[in-house]
Amino acid sequence: MSRQRGRRQRGFSLLELAVVAVILSLLLGLLLERLSYYQEAAERARFEATLQGYKTALQIRLAELILERREGEARRLEVENPTRWLSERPTDYGGALPARPEPGAWYFDEPARELVYVPNSARRLQVELRNGMKQLRFAVKVVYQDVPVSGRSVRSVAGIVLQPAAEYRWP
């Protein structure tokens, strides 16, 4: 009998196993939250890079019109699909905006004349819902300024912007 009392029990107790399970589930929860955060940050970076590509393409097109002395055609840039001026279409460009757009893609809303991005993972994106989903919408706007010429003021093309159609915040 003295042999049985001196023996130690091998293995884990139920309490120790429960504590390990709770710790592992907490760590897994933190890992998944961080993963979600980094996925959204990567999507935001891709979105911003594509948006900058659109802005650059529009600025280059406007510069071409100015160099060719065709500033009068600049107003057309506000109604045309800006994708037309990219050297390559983005791989996530979906064409005309459908009734049920796919998340993670760019579209052109022809009736509204707006470039639209439908985010895939946007838990932190703050924007008003449109058709039950978050959409980032941008409109092309030609900027004019008055320039003094021979004692009078002449309205001239000063630049072009791709401005948000609605305010958004994506921290």
Image (cartoon, rainbow, N blue to C red):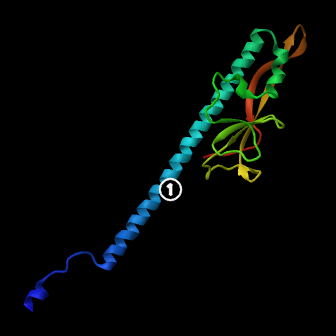
Q: In which quarter of the image is residue 25?
A: bottom left
**Residue 42 appearing in the image:** yes
Q: Quadrant of residue 119?
A: top right
Residue 83 x %, y %: 71, 28
Residue at disc 1, secondary structure = helix
What amino acid type is highlighted by mark number 1? Glu
Q: Name the residue tied to disc 1.
A: 33
**Residue 156 appearing in the image:** no
| Image-based side of 156 in relation to 138, left or right | right
The total of numbered circles placed on residues is: 1
* Residue 24, above or below 59: below
Residue 4 x %, y %: 12, 87
Q: Quadrant of the N terminus?
A: bottom left
Residue reaching furthest to the right:
152
Residue 40 x %, y %: 56, 47
| Image-based side of 12 in relation to 110, left or right | left
Query: Residue at the location (46% across, 58% down)?
Result: 30
* Residue 65, above or below 105: above
Residue 13 x %, y %: 28, 78
Residue reaching furthest to the top:
150
Query: Residue at the location (59% across, 41% down)?
Result: 44
Residue reaching furthest to the bottom:
1
Report crowding for label 1: few under 14, some 14 to 19, many 20 or more residues within 10 A (C-alpha).
few
| Image-based side of 47 in relation to 150, left or right | left
* Residue 89, above or below 9: above
